[in-house]
Image (cartoon, helix red, strand yellow):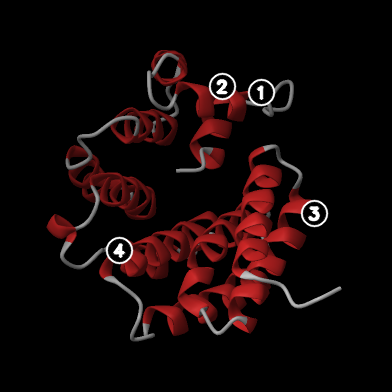
Amino acid sequence: MGERSAADAELLGALGRAHAAAGRWDDAVLRLDDAIDTWTRLDRPVDASRPLCERLRVAGLLGRGDDVERLCAMAARLRAHPACTPVDDAHLRLAEGRACVALGRLERGAGLLALPDAEDLPAPVVASARRWAARAAGGPAADALRAQVTCEPWRTLAALDARLAAGEGTHEQVEALTADPTAGREVRRTLARCPPGDDPGAFLADHFRY
């Protein structure tokens, strides 16, 4: 087999994300790692940021602390690269912070999720970061962060998080997210993987990709 190209790297990343969306974790890890390696071999490390972000999400979900440490170190190197843009940096910090929160490394996660120059970043990235930062913070600090999440579906996801933290039902939030005109399809696909007997709200809070 010949040398892989940028098109191969793009395809591997897309396949990895598709496997992750379907909960096929082993296949996702394999393809995403291949995509990251291919971009690195092509001497285009910053292009590895997208598969790296998804790889971090998967590692956090699966509770693989060693993987998260290794991938966070890689992300930190990418964020220091001269070609890394502020938006690239924000996506990587969000992925690192989310994975840390998923593992219970809350203080570290909160630090990563405090995005610098948030007013200049895409609103969805900022909203997702604040939502996960609220999960790390808890208490009144979490309420303050959630109040800053104003765009959908993250505003409703943040409300879902708050109700879960309070031990309250989330049926209303799950229904609203399922019907969301933008995110509804992804929400329904995520909930289709919720194991029987599990809380759909809790599953969605952890597994929603964005």
Q: What residue type is labelled 3?
A: Asp
Q: Mark 4 points at which residue?
A: 87
Q: Mark 4: which secondary structure?
A: helix
Q: How many labels does the image show?
A: 4
Q: Mark 3 points at which residue?
A: 26
Q: In this view, does 59 lie above or below 1?
A: above
Tag 2 or tag 4, which sits nearer the N-term?
4
Q: What residue type is labelled 4?
A: Val
Q: In which quarter of the image is the N terminus?
A: bottom right
Q: Name the foreground residue: 202 vs 71.
A: 71
Q: Does the residue at mark 1 contact the one at mark 2 (Cβ under 8 Å)?
A: yes
As drawn, is 176 to the left or to the right of 144? right
Tag 2 or tag 3, which sits nearer the N-term?
3
Tell me how far mark 1 sits from mark 2, CA to CA: 6 Å
Q: In this view, does 88 lie above or below 180?
A: below
Mark seen at residue 188? 2
The local crowd at label 4, few if under 14, some if 14 to 19, many if 20 or more residues have their Cα within 10 Å, is some
